[in-house]
Image: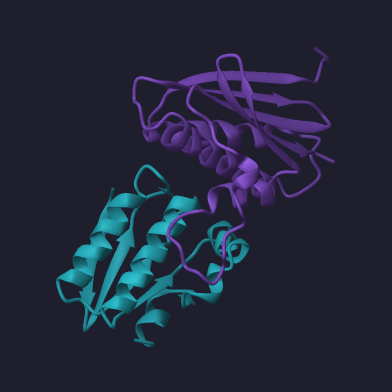
Amino acid sequence: MDKNRIQVDIKVPNQTRYLSLIGRIGEDIANELYKYRGDRETLAYHINLVLTEAMVNAIRHANADDPDKTVRILIYISDEELVIQVHDSGQGFDINAIQSPDFDALEDRGRGIFLIRSLMDSVCYRREAAGNVLEMTKQLH
Amino acid sequence: MNLYIEKKKDVTILYVREERLDAHNSGELKTEMGRLFEGGEKNILVEMKDVRFIDSSGLGALVSGFKNAISHQGNLKLASLQPQVKSMFELTRLHRVFEIFGSSAEALDTF
């Protein structure tokens, strides 16, 4: 592990009450990226938001609101990039089948993955041995 | 969720006194707006001054309230959005849907 690399590994119960805790951790991490030259306040909001959206996706859809399941969040930070993984243990879904929202349709739902895709540089969802992982990467320079 | 309701003439002001409007608490806001329109309120102003963070569920709850207003021949308008919150409306093009005002006082004159 190079000297400027940080790794954060968190497990929380599959419940929306933990969204603010994880979002706050994401904001704190953004504020520690002292080499980041962009608008740090905006970066902090965006990290908070993508963590929130990815967790809600895991809690509600992948883990089907089962409060006994857990969501694992892994965050890797280097000088070059920020990688966020959200692991679920559910059935999974096909991220490529999710279309951008119809902006004129006024639906209550369907903006979460769009927001993640808009704010991160790359997004993928894949099956692993114990479940699925949503991985989101943002270049920091 | 901490909501405070104030009636000014024929407008009901709904103060969202939460730092976050997200998937954990936005269902309550949606329910409350539904209850107000069902109860005969026509004009609702959602005051967002305290809300520092909104996610897609929070946006969805407000969209639901907006549709509820239309179906009851009413109005739902927004006031006092913090800059980062407003940018989420812009990213999802919802700033073209809602009437958004800088302050409650400014919004109240438009009902």
Quadrant assignment, res A25 = top right
- The image position of residue B40, as x and y in percent, is 16, 76
- For the N terminus of chain A, the quadrant is top right
**Residue A85, position in %: x, y?**
63, 27
Task: Give chain A's shade.
Answer: purple
Q: Is residue A20 visible?
A: no
Percent across and percent down for residue B4 are 25, 60
Q: Is residue A111 left or right of residue B72?
A: right
Q: Which residue is drawn at the image coordinates 44% and 32% (left, top)?
A: A59
Location of residue A129 with respect to B109 vertically, above or below: above
Residue A122 versus residue A13 in the image, above or below: below
Foreground residue among B36 and A32:
B36
Q: A78 left or right of B88?
A: right
Which residue corresponds to the image point at 43% horizontal and 54% vertical from the top-left?
B58
Specify the quadrant that holds the C terminus of chain A.
Answer: top right
The chain whose colour is cyan is: B
Q: Residue at x 56, y 44 (%)?
A: A49
Report the side of A79 relative to B27 (left or right).
Answer: right
Residue farthest bottom in this picture: B110
Q: Nearer the viewer, residue A131 or B50?
A: A131
